[in-house]
Image (cartoon, rainbow, N blue to C red):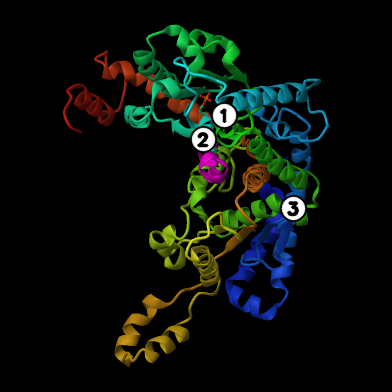
Amino acid sequence: MPSPTQTAAWQALKEERRAWNTLHLRELFAKDKKRFERFSLQLDDLLLDYSKNLIRPQTLKLLLKLAQETGVETLRDAMFSGEPINLTEGRAVLHTALRNRSERPVMVDGQDVMPEVREVLARMRAFADKVRTGKWKGYSGKPISDVVNIGIGGSDLGPAMACLALKPYGGNIRAHFVSNVDPSHLVDTLEDLDPASTLFIVASKTFTTQETLLNAQAARAWFLDSAKDEKAVAKHFVAVSTHSEAVKAFGIDPANMFGLWDWVGGRYSLWSAIGLPIALYVGMDEFEELLAGAYDMDEHFRTAPLAENMPVLMALLGLWYNNFWDAQSYAVLPYEQRLSRFPAYLQQLDMESSGKGVMRDGKPVKVSSGPALFGEPGTNGQHAFYQLIHQGTKLIPCDFLAAVESHNDVNNQHAVLLSNFLAQSEALMRGKTAAEVETELAASGMGRKEIKALLPHKVFPGNRPTNTLLYRKLTSRTLGRLIALYEHKVFVQGALWNVNSYDQWGVELGKQLARAILPELAGGKPGKHDASTLALIARLRAGEEA
Ligand code: G6Q
């Protein structure tokens, strides 16, 4: 696969960018009454309106040509068919197999992985049903009331985000998530829990992650403090991992272990048994709805032509700003409080996957790769950081997300939420001209001198690009579609930049470095460090305040 810069489309896009120096969306909307129809796409109840982007028909044509020239479709087909596209780890990338709702086999090294996938799903169902109906009893005979997932990164962010999003489908089990090695996270979580009705899920693909193992040990000690019987552990601790030996060594019966496979990347694993907290919280039927939603998106991504392919279009638009408009960041703004952890989840998905400096062949990427992603739910973000998006010097493309219908009908507030949602993207697109500001200020009775001084501060340049994603209601199926949409978007960008989206050596580095410093904090011989790190270690050893 070539570097994208070697394609004819890339060179033509540079020209296209220059043409945009004199174009404004406000005028393009005025000229083309069909702009919304031209630049929007519907997949069942999910609408992508991408008309408020800095594109015209020829821009899109060139972007689609780039997708063709960089071989996006070939890599996509290789992923779905189980080829080891994660080159640096020699692995297939098959989170799509986990939600394959068809009878199609998925082959890895000549073997169909679907029977094993179905078997784990069946075990999850049996277990979730038992716990949710109260048939699974704790050591004192009490049913389970609280589930605590102990995991970090990919073994935490997805399930934590999804449980929050799917609250309306939650049953009588409360779900909690402990990830940070900061002991306060565990302590605060356990504070109000009853050991006799608490179930811990120790979720770690590798079962070597320091934070997770330490928190799991501490949780076990907390539990045994009340239960006072090692045998009770089996009723309160289950594991999700690929490593049955390590699980056993930790003291969890492998019969209470749910497996996954090395072809599931951590940040793509919520569809596997890593999703067990979701299944316990909303029930297995809803969990399967989540899988079905992702499968809808997989089928769309796999079969729709590039020009009508949601993840492809979103990826191309992202690349357009990232590489031709020098956008360094990207905001995801759900007007849905229950998606409050969605940006954090996407942060890992996008930044861990696309935060790469070399191409698939190990040569440096010559262009800017993944942007920094951030976001908060609207309307909260409006009262915080939108200022920079409206009037700052940086271009920040945004995705606005909202549901037509809310799960809660209170005081007409959903309509207020939606009016804000629409007003923001419209304002970002249109801006406010000097003439408009002047008219407004004059009408308020302001004098000429004052108007002159204030005017530049009140002008909004507009021409700031946004996507709008509108769905009927935040159901499990919709959430599945949305997550898979962003997963595939990230995949396409990886293909466009020719980077491996599926490794994470930066995470591994963190895991190694902390292990080396720990004994030094405990009084061991200081290692070779820079003066700043040495001084900080000395300060911490002395117990002084930093
Ligand atoms: C995800 C990353 C990383 C990983 C965590 C937890 O893609 O690899 O976030 O999920 O480090 O790893 P374990 O599940 O192995 O504990």
Tell me the quadrant of the picture where the C terminus can be found: top left
Marks 2 and 3, Cα distance to the nearest angstrom? 39 Å
Give the numbered dot on residue 59. none
Mark 2, mark 3: which one is toward the viewer? Answer: 2
Dot 3, how many residues are within 10 Å of its Cα: few (below 14), some (14-19), or many (20+)?
A: many
Please report the residue visible at 70 percent of the width from the left and 65 percent of the height from the top: 39
- Image quarter of residue 195: top left
Q: Mark 1 points at which residue?
A: 132
x 43%, y 68%: residue: 391
* Residue 475 placement (x, y as % from top left): 62, 48
Residue at x-position 47% and y-position 54%: 377
Seen in the picture, residue 478 relative to 121 is either above or below; the reply is below
The residue mark sitting in front, 3 or 1, is 1
Q: Is residue 25 above or below residue 357?
A: below
Q: Earlier in the sequence, mark 2 or mark 1?
A: 1
Q: In the structure shown, which secondary structural element does the residue marked by tag 2 occupy? A: loop
- The answer, for residue 432, to whether it is visible in the render is yes
Local crowd at mark 2 within 10 Å, few (<14), some, or many (≥20)?
some
The foreground one among 401 and 24 is 401
Give whichever of discs 3 and 1 has the lower sequence position.
Answer: 1
User: In the image, which disc is placed on residue 172?
Assistant: 2
In depth, the one of 280 and 302 nearer the eye is: 280
Quadrant in which the N terminus is drawn? top right
Q: Which residue is denoted by mark 3 in the rendering?
A: 309
Report if the beta carbon of the residue with label 3 is closer than 8 angstroms to ligand 1.
no
Image check: 235 left or right of 532? right
Q: Residue furthest front?
A: 141
The magenta segment is 159-170
